[in-house]
Amino acid sequence: MLAPDETRLLTETFRKVLTSTPAAAVDAALTGAGWPDLLIEHPDAATALVFRLLGETGTHAPLLNDVLLHAAGQPLGGTMPLPGAGGRWLLWDRTGHRPDALDPDLPLHPIPTGAELPLAPGRRALSWWLLGTGHAMLTLARTHALTRTQFGRPLSSFQAVRHRLAESLVALEAAEATLSVATDELGALLAKAATGQAALTTARHCQQVLAGIGFTAEHDLHRHVRRTLVLDGLLGSSRELTREAGALIRTLGHAPRLAQLT
């Protein structure tokens, strides 16, 4: 467990690395800043801190490989096949971009097959990334609503706009509450489903608030929306995981308790 002062210092350090380092050098810069040691010593705190920052800053790095390698008891710094949506397998390359990459910003490309791997730590890590991305989109939409006018009134004064932003925030906060108690396989599965759905909901609402400008290459929203779609599909999409959770509950005949409420 990290102390509050340690968390603040590490947050500032990693945020500076992510915002000031060229994309091609982020992986090496994070390694130099102590990411591997932090993951080994404090895996839960490391994934929550760094993956959320990846989402908030709009940066990317192949750190999901490290989370899964660590969970499997293997050395960090390599790659692992990742299950994607629809039963296909993907590899997050650490050596550079490929022409068959799924996204222009991510060196993530299809491979023929993969093998079983521990999914819960990776799902928790992706959940934090999706939350950070959701909050980044919400910040962009909120700033737009506060600074733009329509029919002589601030955009933020319209009830429809306020409702979309509020629904996005509620979805993200609820998903984070689910993630905060995700201590086992089922909890991680539900957290990934909840954060994926919350990020997709936020993307939809923020696109409506930003209107046409959100579709343009000059605005950052489209990058966050693409990132959301890709991350939601990794290690099980929100739809696939919801169906899986439903099938499990039907088999058990009851819904397992995820948190003790007092």
Image (tube, rainbow, N blue to C red):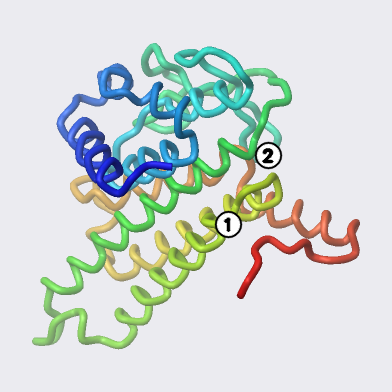
Pinpoint residue 18: horizontal percent, then vertical percent: 24, 33
**Is 222 located above or below residue 143 in the figure?**
above
Circles 2 and 1, Cβ within 8 Å, touching? The answer is: no
Answer with mark 2 or mark 1, whichever residue precedes in sequence.
2
Q: Quadrant of residue 34?
A: top left
Q: In the depicted view, which residue is nearer to us: 164 or 171?
A: 171
The amino acid type, in three-letter code, at marker 2 is Gly
Which amino acid does the dot numbered 1 rest on?
Val
- Frontmost of labels 2 and 1 is 1
Q: Nearer the viewer, residue 73 or 169?
A: 73
Position of 118 relative to 128 (above/below): above
Judge whether 216 appears above or below 17 on screen.
below
Residue at 41% across / 16% down in the picture? 94
Q: Which mark is residue 139?
A: none
With 78 as the anchor, is 139 left or right in this view? left
Image coords of residue 65 (percent x, y): 51, 24
Q: Which residue is mark 1?
A: 181
Please state, as top left, top right, bottom left or bottom right, where the C terminus lies in the image.
bottom right
Identify residue for label 2: 86
Q: Quadrant of the N terminus?
A: top left
Quarter location, residue 16: top left
Residue at screen point 49% across, 40% down: 44
Q: Is residue 119 left or right of residue 93?
A: right
Above or below residue 17? Residue 262 is below
Could you give the CA–CA distance between mark 2 and mark 1, rounded to whole angstroms?
28 Å
Residue at 28% across / 66% down in the picture? 211
